[in-house]
Image (spheres, coloured by chain):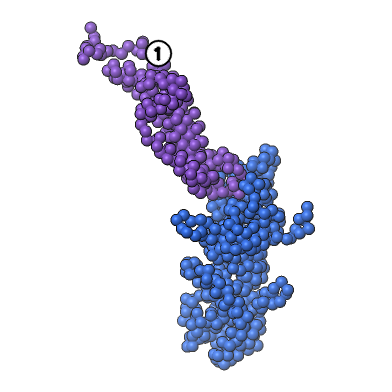
Amino acid sequence: MAQTSEATGPIITFDHVVKEFRQRGKAHAARAVDDVTLSIDEGDVFGIIGYSGAGKSTLVRLINALEQPTSGTVTVMGQQVSSMRESQLRPLRQKIGMIFQQFNLFSSKTVAQNVAYPLKLDHWRKDYQDKRVKELLEFVGLSEHADKYPSQLSGGQKQRVGIARALATNPKVLLADEATSALDPETTTEVLELLKRVNERFGITIVLITHQMNVVQQIANRVAVMSAGKVVEQGRTYDVFAAPRQEVTKRFIATAMDGLPDQARIEVMRSQWPGRLVSVLIRQHDITDAAGRVLVPASGQDISELIARHDVRSSLLYGGIDTVQDIAIGAMTYEFTGDADHIDTFLADLARHSDIVDFGTREHPVDYDTAVARAQLAPPLEEEATRTRRTLADDLEMEEQVDDAVEETPTASQQEGSTR
Amino acid sequence: MNAITAHGVTLASRTDWSVLRPLLGQSIVQTLQMVLITIVIGGALGLVLGVVLYGTRPGNLFENRVVYRILDILVNIVRPIPFIIFLAAMQPLTIKVVGTSIGTSAAIFPMVVMCTFATSRLVEQNLVPVDHGMIEAARSMGASTFTIIRTVLIPEALAPLILAYAFLFIGVLDMSAMAGYIGGGGLGNFAIAYGYQKFDQAVTWTAVIIMIVLVQVVQAIANAIAKRLLRR
């Protein structure tokens, strides 16, 4: 086939896709997906993250044509699904597995019958069906539950049946629509591990819809952030985590990473530690563009060395470092004590190669919002508050501001160091 | 003499079962015949009509507002008509279809029509609660609409559907009792002709008890099946 030469090319392409839903009794349609252009490469684990109502579930349903776009084209495995009739779509859908938040298992069928269902649709011979079902249940570790009904299984087990069923006809693509949102954290990790194996062992491209940033962090190699129907940011997962450009992205990252303390925690720390409270962002690597140009430099890599060289007294109070795609990322909060000028010099030196947030001392505190704003970071806000506050206009405005801000970051923190 | 006369009607103080027993047997056969034929034909047509009602609902498998509105109104018009009046109103159509407007088979035709409409609404109502997620899952695997109806929708709603058909059985039995009015037979006719009109309570109650037993047996079977299905 001609396609083998571009095996690593995009397997799914969105080209200026718009999806509108007519609303009863309203003059204009609701736009769930707004001019999305996106490509997903074969073998990717592609995370699409956004708050509920951001349009991500609609976006994923355009891939297997459960929804048809209002305009624009969706191409999957070289076929333009957005112009295909329902009957033409059937063979293609067998090559696109899908799993769901509520699992959507057939409650009147046993586990084995659920997994066999797509094989029946594909008219497999009965003995082949049985063999394949056995194989799949072994893969997801549910062999002993073959004859149970879904209601007898736990949430995690149900989703594993869902995965087995979705993999039955050897699909090339697996769509996961909030597949872990109904699960507890431990089970979530279990299911994500399974999805990772699916990707690694069978080379299946996974498109993962979620509102949980830690899900993206754990398995996605690429991520797109959706807000109000638009893809506002996309890139390699580490890059997006390490240098989020959009406000909405920063808020998602704050929910996944415990690195930067929130305002209440700073107040508690200040009541106990009178010295200079400073958060240092940790980024193990530079973030580069395709040409290798450094977009955002690494941060916090020389902090121990600088503490030793400047001979400042430091206490590590708070922090969190996590890995994204096996690269360390996070923040540490220190209390520095001693002569104020001495600390200023040290901080100026530190800020040369690191992003820092200076909260000041108990005697000369820096207001939380001001400190974070100076460092051009987003405070970890409550999810609820952001959901009501976000609008499309905000996002567009934010984009311009943040674009400028990224370049200014090092100088901004340097200035701050010298003004104190 | 052990018979008394009142208003010119002879009241039998002792029921003559040697005459009535064969008539009763015949009536039971006629009732079962009417009810079973109606349930099988009307039930099947009602299932189809019910699936169409469900499927054409806004947001469903083959959404079609116009078809849904028309069928919905039609069902709403037919269902509330008392069966005894429906029987009379259907007479011209019955003659066209069956060839006669009297007798057991003439009763079956309007029974099938009424049963179809009643079934359709019950089927629709029992399909509505089936989780849309399962239908979407089947669609995502490439199942056709007909396959989804056959392999997902109906199996998922099977337990309540069986109970609905048991409920219908009682309704159809009720309808069959009125067949006597147009010269049909059956237990209803037997109770009225040989019980009520002859002031013979024993005959009336014999027919009533047989009908109660019939209903109990059908309901018990349906309950047992539904319970087994729901235990999943």
In the rendered view, would you say B22 is above or below A86?
above
Few, some or many residues within 10 Å of mark 1 (<14, 14–19, 20+): few
In the displayed structure image, the side of residue A370 where residue A300 appears, left or right: right
**Residue found 69% across the figure and 53% down from its top:** A79
Chain seen in blue: A
> Quadrant of the rendered structure where residue A304 is?
bottom right
In the rendered view, would you say A120 is above or below B178?
below
In the rendered view, would you say B119 is above or below A257?
above
Residue type pointed to by label 1 = Pro
**Residue found 51% across the figure and 40% down from its top:** B52
**Residue found 61% across the figure and 44% down from its top:** B143
Give the farthest residue toward the top. B1
Nearer the observer, B12 or B224: B12
**Residue found 59% across the figure and 65% down from its top:** A231
Res. B126 in view? no
Which residue is tagged 1?
Answer: B22
In the displayed structure image, the side of residue B101 where residue A51 appears, left or right: right
Rendered location of residue A96, percent (x, y): 65, 52
- Give the secondary structure at mark 1: helix
Q: Please identify the quadrant where the C terminus of chain A is shown.
A: bottom right
Q: Colour of chain B?
A: purple
> Quadrant of the rendered structure where residue A413 is?
bottom right
Rendered location of residue B211, percent (x, y): 38, 25
